[in-house]
Image (cartoon, rainbow, N blue to C red):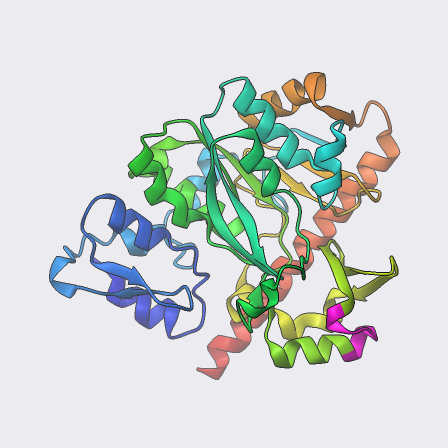
Amino acid sequence: MKTFKDLIEEVQKSGLCHHCCGCLNFCTAINYGALAQDEAGQPYLKDEDKCIECGLCYTICPETGELEKEIKEHYQWSPPIGSVQDIAIARSIDKKVLKNATDGGVVTALLQHLLREESIDGAIVSKPVGPFRRQPYLATNQREILEAAGFSLDLSHGMQVLSQSYSTYTSSVEEFKTISKRGLHKVALVGTPCQIRTVRKMQYLNLVPSDSIKYCFGLFCSGSFSFGEKERQQLESIGGFSWEDISRINIKDRLIITLNNGETKSISLEHIDFLKRYACRFCTDYTSEFADISFGGLGAPQGWTTIITRTSAGHSILKSGQREVLECIGEDDEPEHIRTIAKTARWYANQKRQTARENRQHYLVGQ
């Protein structure tokens, strides 16, 4: 039986840990408490005497490959982007949501709608706490969900002094312990592919507190980008702008930076590979293939969101939202456009999977 010590050797020391913290939060949720998290967000063995060596932390890690076959069968996965019921583009009809949103505000609109309909009693989201810095948060009302909308750089109010190193990643799974404490039973999780994969493994094994996750909202993910001082200087040089002039950022098939004067800088992702976290170079999932419903800006016009529904639950969410809170365009409305988006998504998914496999092969050769 492999344990957390094996995760240290096989995943952490290899630099493959995604910091999703599924191992930590499962252990904490059932009161073992053997694990803790360091300042960098990486789990570590805090109290070896409390570890019962059950091996579940190893099993649910998205990097071990454990249960991969089982969850693929369970969620009817098929290459290259998993199960697909519908592909559409949409945007919120609420002006407040659109003002705060990065793309079309669809995730925010749907979460608020589900909360109003009492289909959920909370949502695990991430909220901004500084430039390029977000933290996981369990939102339980409309205001909290709206505050978590978007992905922007707020350089006001002295927030820039909070940290010298920012990241586009936040470990949403961290909020599992909050679910347990507050006794919520119908929660939507908004997460990256590695986080969704961890949750699905936990749900497959019926592990607490994943039973409280009712819906998984997956985000398209090119990788998590870190912006330390050295990285910021290099990005300034590539883009021809000053860091202090940034007002907003978006990541689609390119890094899109909006300056305070309204000017937009667009940088190819291949030119900012130096910003990507090491573990992300080995991830094969671009479109959150095990989510109920996936979201991203890829292929969508400015101000719109691309949506992939994957399960009957995801399909129902979109249909309900379409009636109440979304303006939606599907294949029946613009078949050629939607087919182009589907083709583009498959291409990017294949590219990410191929690159990850090549990187892993190079890594194994170099060991």
User: From which residue to which does the magenta span run?
Assistant: 237-244
Quadrant in which the C terminus appears: bottom left
Residue at screen point 67% across, 57% down: 154
The reply, left or right, for residue 236 in relation to residue 7 is right
Find residue 26 and report its horizontal and vertical position in percent.
Answer: 29, 47
Task: Please say whether residue 88 is visible from this viewpoint.
Answer: no
Confirm whether the magenta stretch covers residue 248: no
262 in relation to 71, above or below: below
Q: Nearer the viewer, residue 68 or 258?
A: 258
Residue at screen point 14% across, 55% down: 52
> Splitting the image into 4 quarters, where does residue 291 fall?
top right
Task: Please say whether residue 5 is visible from this viewpoint.
Answer: yes
Find residue 353 and report its horizontal and vertical position in percent.
Answer: 61, 58
Q: Nearer the viewer, residue 5 or 247?
A: 247
> Splitting the image into 4 quarters, where does residue 273 fall?
bottom right
Q: Nearer the viewer, residue 64 or 39?
A: 39
The reply, left or right, for residue 130 in relation to residue 69 is right
Find residue 228 and report its horizontal and vertical position in percent.
Answer: 59, 75
The reply, left or right, for residue 63 in relation to residue 266 is left
Residue at screen point 80% across, 27% down: 331
